[in-house]
Amino acid sequence: MTPNEFREHGHAVIDWIATYREKIEERAVSRPIEPGAIRAALPKAPPRHAEPVSDIMADFESILLPGVLHWQHPSFFGFFPSNVELSSVLGDLLSTGLGVVGVSWEAGPALTELEETCIDWLRQMLGLRPAWRGAIQESASISTLIAIICARERYSGCAYTQGGIRQPAQPGMIYTSARAHSSVGKAAMIAGFGMDHIRTVPTQPGGSLDAQVLRAMIDQDIASGARPAAIVATTGATANTAMDDIAALADVAEEWGMWLHVDAAMGGAAMLLPECRSEWEGIERADSIVVSPNKWLGAAFDSSVMFVRDHEHLTRVMSTRPSYLRTQTDGQVTQLRDWSIPLGRRFRALKLWFLIREQGVEGLSKRIRRDMVNARRLAQLVEAEPEWRVTNKITLQTVCVRHEPPGFGDEELDTHTRAWAQAINESGKAYLTAARVDDAWMVRVSIGALGTQWQHIEKLWADMRAHAAENAALMQARTADSAMRGQKNAA
Ligand code: PLP
C-alpha cells in the first residue's frame, strides 16, 4: 500500500470508527451467534491475488461486525470497563504507524523516555511516592507473573536463576485469597512454584484476606519445611471489587521478608481520587503493584503498568546482555527490555500520553467519580426493591445483585440468576456477566463504559426487573407443571 493509498483508506477507516462510536447506542450490545459461524463465513484459504481495501472493509462489516461484542457501548456492564478513549486510539495509531521496536534505548530514545515520563505521571496521579518506578507490560497477568518471578528470586536468594527448577531445597509458598484473579495461580505455575504451593487464604466478612489465618498458615508451612515467598493482595477483586487490607498484609510480609504484590489492575484507577486512597492504605510498603490503564482509565489495550519499589532487583532478575544490543549509552539510560519478558516493545506510551494530555487528570477523575456515584445510586435502588439483594460492598463501580423470589431453593436461585442475565444479553439491550462468589451465583453490574450515564443504568434496572420477573414466572410455571404431572402419575 502506498502512502497515498493509505491516506485515502486511512481517512475512511477513521471516519468509520468515528461513526461507529457516534452511533454505537443504536446497535445491540451483542447478538447471539453460533460458535463457528464467523469462521464458516470466511474463506478457507488466503487470497492468491491482491484484493481491494473496499472489499476487505465490506467483509469486515458484513462478516466480522456481527460477531463483535460492543465493549464501548454505554449499556455494556460486563466483565470490567475496558475503555478506549478516542485520543488513546490516535496515540496507538501513531505507534503502529511509526513501527518502532524498542529493543534498547538507542532503538527508540523517545519510546523509552516517554514511557518513563508517563509512568511517572501515573505514579503521581495515584498518589504514590517517587521511589516507585515502572514499565508498561502487555497485561495485568504478565505484570503479576513478573512480580511472582521477583518473589521467587528474593526468597531463594536467586537460586532459581542459577540452579534452575531443582533449586532450592525448600519450596516457596504463595498466599492469596479466593477472590484473587486467576492470573495469580497461572503466574505461580509458570514461575515454577506449582499449584501445590499456592495457599488460598480465607477472607474476613468484609472480603479482605484474613491476616490472622494467614499467619497461622505460614507457621504451619514453615513447620513442614516450606518458605513463605509472596503474598498477592487485591485492590478491587474482579468478581465483586473486594479490597484486601494492604497494611495488615504488609505487616505479615515484612515479618517474613516476603514479596507483597498488589493487583489493582482495574481498581487502581480509583486511586486517582484522594478520597479512595484509604482503600489501599499501606500501599507504600508493597513491593510491586499492577494498575492497568487499559481497563477503567481509558487507554487502549494493551497498557498495563507494573510498578516496583526495588527496580534493581527486578532488572537483576529480568536482564539479558546479548552483544548485539550493547551500546555506548549502557549504564546511562533505562533499558526497558530489562523490565519485562519480551525483548521488543511497541511505542505504547503514546496512547497513554495522548489520553492523559487530552483528558487531563481532572477529566479522568471526574469520569471515575461519576461511575462510583452511579454504582452507589444503583445499589440503593436494588436494596429498596423487595426480592432483590446487593451482595457486595460497593467499593468501586461494580454492583453485585441477586433476585431472590420467595420459595426458590439455592439451586433454583443459581439457575434463575444465570438465566435472567443470559436473557438480557440475548436481548441485546445490555450486557452483564454472572459470577460465583461464596458458592452462590450473582450478577455483576460493572458500571464504567465511557458513555454510560445514569439514564443507561436506570434503563438497565428496568430491564433487569422485567427479565428476572419473566424468568421467575417461567420457572414457577415449570415447577407447578411438573408437580401436577407427578400427582397425576401417582394417581
Ligand atoms: N487482575 C484483575 C483484578 C482483573 O480484573 C483482571 C482482568 O480480568 C486481571 C488481573 C487480568 O487482566 P489481563 O487481561 O490484563 O491479564
Image (tube, rainbow, N blue to C red):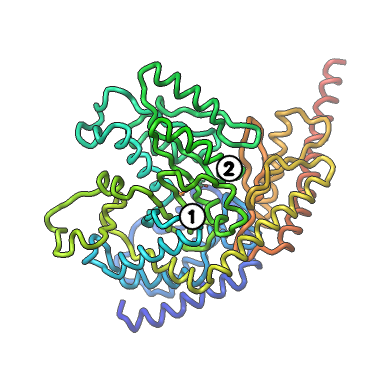
- What's the amino acid at mark 1? Ile
Which residue bears the numbered disc 1? Answer: 38
Q: Is residue 67 left or right of residue 336?
A: right
Other residues around mark 1 within 10 Å, as few (<14) / some (14–19) / many (≥20): some
Secondary structure type for disc 2: loop
Q: Nearer the viewer, residue 210 or 375?
A: 210
At label 2, the amino acid type is Met
Residue 336 shows in this picture: yes
- Location of mark 2 (residue): 243
How far apart, in angstroms, are the residues tagged by discs 2 and 1?
A: 40 Å
| The N terminus - image quarter | bottom left
- Residue 63 seen in the current view: no
Q: Is residue 149 left or right of residue 383?
A: left
| SS class, disc 1 | helix
Instruction: Classify 226 as above or below 88.
Output: above
Q: Quadrant of the C terminus?
A: top right
Residue 454 position in % (x across, y down): 72, 62
